[in-house]
Amino acid sequence: MTTCGEFLVKQLEAWGVDTVFGIPGVHTVELYRGLPHSGIRHITPRHEQGAGFMADGYARVSGKPGVCFIITGPGITNILTAMGQAYADSIPMLVISSVNERARLGLGKGYLHELPNQRAMTAGVTAFSHTLMSVEELPGVLARAFAVFEGERPRPVHIELPLDIITADASHMRLAARPRVERPAPNRTLIRDAAALLKNAQRPLLLLGGGCVAAQAEARALAASLDAPTALTINAKGLLPPNHPLLLGSNQSLLPVRQLALEADVVLAIGTELGETDYDVVFDGNFKLGGALIRVDIDAQQLQRNFAPHLAIQGDARLAMRMLLAELNPCEPRADSPGARRTAAVQAQLAEDFAGWGHYRQLFDTVLEVLPEARFVGDSTQTVYSGNHLVELDGARRWFNASTGYGTLGYGLPAAIGAKLAEPGRPVISLMGDGGLQFTLPELASAVEAGVGIIVLLWNNSGYGEIKRYMQRRDIEPLGVDIYTPDLLAIARGFGCAAERARDHAHLAELLRTAPSDRPLIIEVLEQAPFHP
Ligand SMILES: Cc1ncc(C[n+]2csc(CCOP(=O)(O)OP(=O)(O)O)c2C)c(N)n1
Ligand SMILES: [Mg+2]
């Protein structure tokens, strides 16, 4: 007999799932029966939050949904934070869990792992959450999940299998064909209207968000054809390469870019929420758009949030860019074009704003000199905040972190593990603070076990530095921020990792050059000279 749990594994494998993240429990063992002899690799984290963050990093890099196998109750409540981050950043994630038997749901009798209503817990951080009521439903529900991942704004999906379903006989089930899901193309008339507005623009501005990551070539062609200075959200970083004559970076919260946004006569915003953590990280409400706003988004509701559009175009970002490009004259970027000159003027002003950040620049230069192809997966710490402004890389999804959107600590280590599993050939730097690292520190053990050679660049200031400064700026006596900081290097060694403190930049470069390939290396950088004034 084939159980429903076994059938599910076969169906996932048939649809291209090659990795699942999970911690088994008595409720989910039936999912594991079919795994050892399948083509799916199982990665075991040390906490379900780690599973979710790994799946998130894996999804961003692979472009495929990150899949987790999670137990009823505590497994689900543990993974909710990671689902929240994935929800906020529109990341495809499939959380498969168990739940108590159908006849026992909602009874509150104290069954093992029982929650009053597990599905309601995940409803707020998913596109949908579904309780499987029969084996026969399974292919259709999975197809709906893939429709979310591939056909609309990606978001986590939760499917829970009651214990009497997960063990039920599925011998009669045949593998379903993979659903073909196309993202919707925008309306051609609206695209023509947008092109007409853009052709007449004197001072266009392009704002690109994470919805554009699959459209790198189109984004570059569009920026050039419009001769538009281009600002990227953190999730869109890399769509334009460093030193591109039209690249404004991710500095929408800084005055020079804000001035340019105010003066722009036509603004084209694609696949971006226009949300505060990318456009107003100083929280003063002063990011304003002066001209006509054209918005393109796959999510109709998103078109109406934050900034009311002059023209709202629902549809896939890449298709929209292609259709727009067909209406415009192709053009190569030129350093002396009007758009490039406006960009250069902003860059010159930004250089003044960044004058005090030479030490961060030197840190990133050192890393990129040794590992020019590196991917940076970050948490919420000084290196991440500064790098969000300073670092530009060639290629989407080479710089992402949890400092924007949901903004949860503990993301950067497990997400880096997931990213490395998705593309083992590319060096991965996990940018962590001492506080954030302690949220998901045991995932170092998972990384050692999985043979994952990531490099953790640990910025150590023995506390919640950012929050301490925030308290001080607001005249609040710092409390709860100068935390006891253990010997994180000794702990990392205890987990089986390599771990060293960098003495200076030359030593840092040497450590990066000799990093082991089969286990993590933790490089501690103290927030003091020579790394910090
Ligand atoms: C889950 C969670 N809890 C609390 C916070 C609030 N918070 C944001 S940054 C920060 C400090 C993090 O300290 P550390 O990782 O050492 O970075 P540092 O600011 O010292 O560079 C805190 C506590 C958060 N973002 N997420
Ligand atoms: Mg700190």
Image (spheres, rainbow, N blue to C red):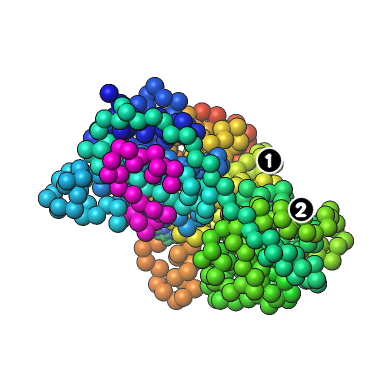
Residue 506 coordinates in the image, percent (x, y):
65, 41
Q: Locate residue 334, reporting x and y percent.
A: 85, 57
Image side of residue 461 versus residue 356, left or right: left
Quadrant of the image occupied by residue 101: top left
- Which quarter of the rendered picture does the C terminus lie within? bottom right
* 455 or 336, nearer to the observer: 336
- Residue extending furthest toward the left: 109
Q: Nearer the viewer, residue 445 or 106?
A: 106
Residue 413, magenta (yes or no): no
Kindly identify the residue that appears in the image at 64 percent across and 74 percent down: 310
Mark 2 neighbour density, 10 Å: few (under 14) some (14–19) many (20 or more): many
- The correct choice, above or below, for 350 with respect to 403 in the image is below
Relative image position of residue 426 (x, y in whole percent) = 61, 36
Q: Please indicate, yes or no, whether residue 190 appears anywhere in the rendered image.
A: yes
Report the magenta residues as a range: 121-145
Q: Residue at x 65, y 61 (%)?
A: 187
**SS at badge 1:** loop
Task: From this view, report whether residue 166 is shown above or below residue 204.
Answer: above
Q: Residue 522: tell me if it is visible.
A: no
The residue at the point 47 percent across, 44 percent down is 146
Secondary element at image label 2: helix
Tag 2 and tag 1, C-beta contact below 8 Å: no
**Which quadrant of the view contains residue 48?**
top left
Disc 1 designates what residue? 372
Amino acid marked by disc 1 = Pro
Residue drawn at x 69%, y 72% is 261
Does 132 lie within the magenta span? yes
The outermost residue toward the right is 336
What residue type is disc 2 on? Answer: Ala
Res. 221 mark: 2
Residue 260 image position (x, y, % from top left): 72, 72
